Image (spheres, rainbow, N blue to C red):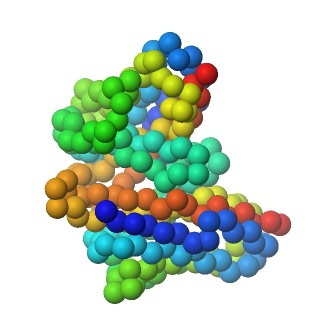
Amino acid sequence: KNEVEQSPQNLTAQEGEFITINCSYSVGISALHWLQQHPGGGIVSLFMLSSGKKKHGRLIATINIQEKHSSLHITASHPRDSAVYICAVMWHEETSGSRLTFGEGTQLTVNP
Amino acid sequence: ETGVTQTPRHLVMGMTNKKSLKCEQHLGHNAMYWYKQSAKKPLELMFVYNFKEQTENNSVPSRFSPECPNSSHLFLHLHTLQPEDSALYLCASSQGTGSYGYTFGSGTRLTVV
């Protein structure tokens, strides 16, 4: 079983602040997803990465495979960034093949 | 709109009712999934379909009955549910079950009264 831990569980920031959300996992993976879930429930895939770093607008995702750790950074945060951010890891289980295991999510609130 | 459409968005049903959730994708994906998201819990995989065939049932009670008539459509039939089944039900699709790229729907918020 792959344990996925996210921190912090809740994060409140002021508009403009730099934000970091962390994810760690216990078993080697083939890919890691960062997902965004808005209050309505829909989930949007932000990044999928298996090494290094990816950047999209104000969002940056990094992964360290050796340390089994990933971070999601948001620069110049804005109230519209308020959402739940979920880390999910794709890994291979011997008996059932590819699995996607989710973290509990980080609730981010950005105040104006 | 992500390319995966779920209907209805909200559903309130009594414990004796029968209802169905629908998921549709026209992304050309071959694998489709049902996930359950209860409050303050990670997403839990319920069912996996690959090329219309069910490849995984994650010990889901029989009051949830999935149906996949083709690679583009996935249903979740509900009957005699319990209040603890109230949750957000999310559908997702991917090119194959080993694919890295998942696309999620907006979910159906189900309340069982």
**Which image quadrant: the C terminus of chain B?**
top right
Q: Position of residue B60 (x, y in %)?
A: 34, 35
Residue B112, placed above or below residue A81: above
| Number of numbered discs on residues | 0
Which residue appears farthest toward the right when viewing the image? A112
Query: Where, by quadrant of the figure, is residue B69 drawn?
Result: top left
Q: Residue at x 79, y 73 (%)?
A: A14
Determine whether, in the image, residue B12 is placed left or right of residue B59.
right
Q: Depth check: B81 or A12 in front?
A: B81
Q: Depth check: B14 or B29 in front?
A: B14
Residue B113, placed above or below residue A86: above
Q: Is residue A89 visible?
A: yes
Q: Position of residue A75 (x, y in %)?
A: 65, 79
Q: Depth check: B112 or B49 in front?
A: B112
Query: Where, by quadrant of the figure, is residue B74 drawn?
Result: top left
Q: Position of residue B24 (x, y in %)?
A: 38, 34
Residue A95, placed above or below residue B39: below
Determine whether, in the image, residue A98 is placed left or right of residue A5.
left
Q: Is residue B1 visible?
A: no
Q: Residue at x 61, y 71 (%)?
A: A8
Q: Residue at x 42, y 63 (%)?
A: A88
Q: Residue at x 55, y 61 (%)?
A: A105
Residue B101, placed above or below residue A73: above
Q: Depth check: B30 or A86 in front?
A: A86
Q: Position of residue B93 (x, y in %)?
A: 34, 46
